[in-house]
Amino acid sequence: MQKKSSIHNLFSLISYKEKKEINDFYIPEINEEDKHVQNNSKQSSIKSETTNLSVDADDNNISTIMQANIEYLFKKFNYPVNKDFVMREFLVAGKYKAFIAYIDGMVDRVTINNFILRPLLNFTNLPDMGNDSQLDFLLKNVLETNQAEKVTKPADIVYGILSGNTCLYVDGCSYYLSCETKGFEKRGVETPQTEGLVRGPQEAFNENLRTNVTLIRRLIKDTNLTTEFVKVGKRTNVQCAVVYINGIINPAIVQEVKRRLTGISADLVMGDGMLEQFIEDSSYTVVPTILSTERPDRTASHLLEGRIAIIVDGTPFALIAPVTLHSFMHTPEETFFKWPVGSLIRLIRIFAVFVAALLPALYIGMVGYHTEMIPTDLMIAIISAKENVPFPTVLEVLLMELSFELIREAGVRIPGLIGNTLGIIGALILGQAAVQANIVSPVLIIIVAVTGLGNFAIPNFSVAFAVRIIRFAFIFGAALLGFYGIGLVLVAVIALLSNMKSFGVPFLSITAPKTSTSGDLIFKKPVWKQEKRPDNINPLDVRRQPNISRKWAQEDAESEERKNIDDGRRDEDA
Amino acid sequence: MLKEGKIGLAEAVSITTLLIITKIFYSSTAVVVKKTGTAAWYMTIISFLTSMLLFTLVYILMKRFPGKNIIEIFQIVLGRFIGKSLGLGFSAFILYYSAMSLREFLELLKAYVLPYTPPSLIFASFICVTILLAYLGFEVIARVSYISIYPVLIGLGILLILASTYYKVDNIKPFFGYGLNTTMYNGVMRSSAYAEVMLLAVAMNTLKDTKTFKKAGYISLVFGGAFFSICLLLYVMAFSYTIGSENLSGMFQLSRIIYLSRFVQRVESLFLFIWVISSVVTVSISFYMSMATYCKVFDIPSQKPLVYVFGILLFTLAILPKNLSEVIEIHMIVIRQYSGIWVFGGPIIVLLISLLLRKKGGSIKDEKI
């Protein structure tokens, strides 16, 4: 029996098995919407929630006896071993037993002392009106915090305490009160670290989720701007804000993002970088398919185009989806400049990508295989410089690339000012010494330096990394087969890129497959001519502005026309 | 049913256009000039007109069976056995076409660029990329061809402009070449050079409707015809018909003679890129189409398990011819001169039979039910 199964297993390795059909997510056209929603969503039944009066406190029930609840919370928070958890028992109005519980450090003590404890202790005229109504009364008349709500599920109050709220319980009640008292240390709103601009707002997200959402809301003062919260990570319980503009975004995207977020069943989800890996479409690609930005204005502009933003509590970045390769080549800078400048900046960036990816490979191919295309004078210069170098060109290139990467990595790790100095000095001295020691040729130093510059000019850090990896594929292709090899790798890279998807949107879409553009792809149209939103994400509202968005221009033209007619009449009269 | 996805008009046009125009990089240019002399540039217009006519007939057939690809139509009209056999023949022919294109590319690459590299390495690396493209599927191939058609056309345009210092109008005289008869005969026969447009009929399911099929076909034919005509005209103007008939690869030779200044000279290696890109994409399209036809004949739901087997077949077929002259004198003549009889002829016979038997596919709605 054992033998048979092992033979069976062996055959199953080489035989064709039909793959389990996976329903690919795609963004439906607007009229397809209803059908898609039906297919994609599982019918969820809403259970009627009933509160049971019970004596025991457990994960499902809140006891009506205070001691049981105290014990439940102690057990939950591993008290007294866990010193962060604080519980204070007291009497409300001098006669009703009650307690508050919170986590030290997460809360604002002033709020608790002045606006929860003081009113509760000083209050004297609590009418006798049944247990549950008493808490209601306290909520309405006594507590002085801005946010306080009834919580009927033990899991919710535990999460509330974990995120910095204070829990209040009065003996005999079947629910808790959760008062908003968050008051942990946080960084202020500072300037962007990696996406700095010459013109435009100089604000960046920080680690506080509320601040981040507010930064966006400040830019888009629209009632349709919607924020939903999803908890992610079994143990980290990170709060994620899903931000979108209702009425612009295709609802299928929202549904899919929420489906993926709630579908994560992992211990640890920390920060946007990890979350990105959990929800992206293709994990085995070097190029990212979700855009990460630290700029509220950039996030806002993507939201207005019909995309969704996911902000994870604790990281100063927003994740934006679905995006295409073009989005990674854009920065808000172009929008703030006039269109010719913006277009030029983008062209330079595309050139930078080509330089960063291809220049060393082209050099290897040219020197090794296609020497005829180098003019004789230049050829002599290259050869005489290379004469004393004992290594083949590809080895030289790899050596220099490797040292360059080393300098860069070391520069990042070394603290503060020394890092910058090390980068410049290291590159200068190392390059000079390598040339003098006849390990590499001087032309190559130029090639590697320009390649490095090209790489730094790529606006997105993840894409710059991807280009660094792809560069090595081109180098090997060129070393093996010259320009022919580069051509082959190029086709393979384009094929792999066009196979990628970001939340159902083909990664190279707008270009291939061709869809209508928003006038803001590579060459920018003037802002008043960018009338439509990008078509590849099927937004509900395609039009961004009417055909004539500068009404004054029309008025000017009309008044000019009127003036001409008047002049004509006057001439006739004369 | 093979899952192929959907492609738009732009992608469909770029696929067929790329397939048609890639020949200009190969031996085709010189062969045409050899056969028809100075009349080459309008001979290709005759070929183009002939293929327009033949394509129209195929379009009539496709219109009778809306939503069906040509393999399904074969089976509906001729019955399962003959239909499937004909489909299988098509699949074999497309594979043969793919292999011979690869071999011709290899021969020219060896002659001009990589004389010391073993052919098997060139084959193997080429086929690896081809397999990757075919594995990723038709949508990806369509996107890649749409992206690559821009550099190919722009590059060729620049090449033709840079070589303009060599153009002499006197070189296209005498206007009638070797006589109208020769030109007409070759023109009609060489309509096979536009037979690639028939691949649209195989990929019918990926198109929106028969109208897109018609549009894509006509646009790429017109485009290919104009392109060939201009290229041949300028080629003859640059080389004259005597030297022009001796070059191995006409366009590559043209790029070789470019000399603008001491710095801009011998730039053919840059044109190697567009040559390689268009060749890889062309072979990948035909390679995929061969598999797709095979899958459609035998109702195989995915081409993915077939790619390796077909890859080996492609390698074997490509390595079969003994030398360059066998490729050019036998296989290329078969493909570019006589294949039209089979590629256009088959469907047209099927059209006649369907007219005689009054067989007709219902509307798309009925078919779905």
Image: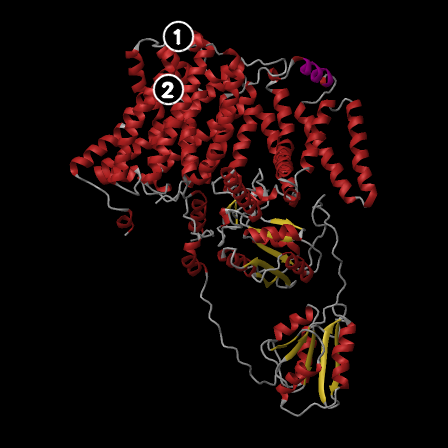
From the top left corner, tell me how far across and down residue A115 is, in percent. 75, 77
Give a yes or no on whether discs 2 and 1 share a subunit.
yes
Q: Is residue A389 left or right of residue B148?
A: right
From the top left corner, tell me how far across and down residue A376 is, in percent. 65, 13
Which residue is drawn at the image coordinates 60% and 51% (left, top)?
A301
Which residue is drawn at the image coordinates 51% and 26% (left, top)?
B154
Q: Which residue is mark 1?
A: B173
Q: Quadrant of residue B266?
A: top right
Question: Would you place residue A517 above or below residue A34 in this image?
Answer: above
Residue projecting furthest to the front: A574
Residue A299 is covered by the magenta coloring: no
Which residue is drawn at the image coordinates 57% and 28% (left, top)?
A486
- Secondary structure type for disc 2: helix
| Three-letter code, disc 1 | Lys
Q: Nearer the viewer, mark 2 or mark 1?
A: 1
Of the pair A217 and A507, the residue shown nearer to us = A217
Q: Which residue is mark 2?
A: B332
Say if mark 2 contacts mark 1, CB within 8 Å. Answer: no
Magenta range: A377-385
| Three-letter code, disc 2 | Met
Q: Is residue A40 left or right of residue A284?
A: left
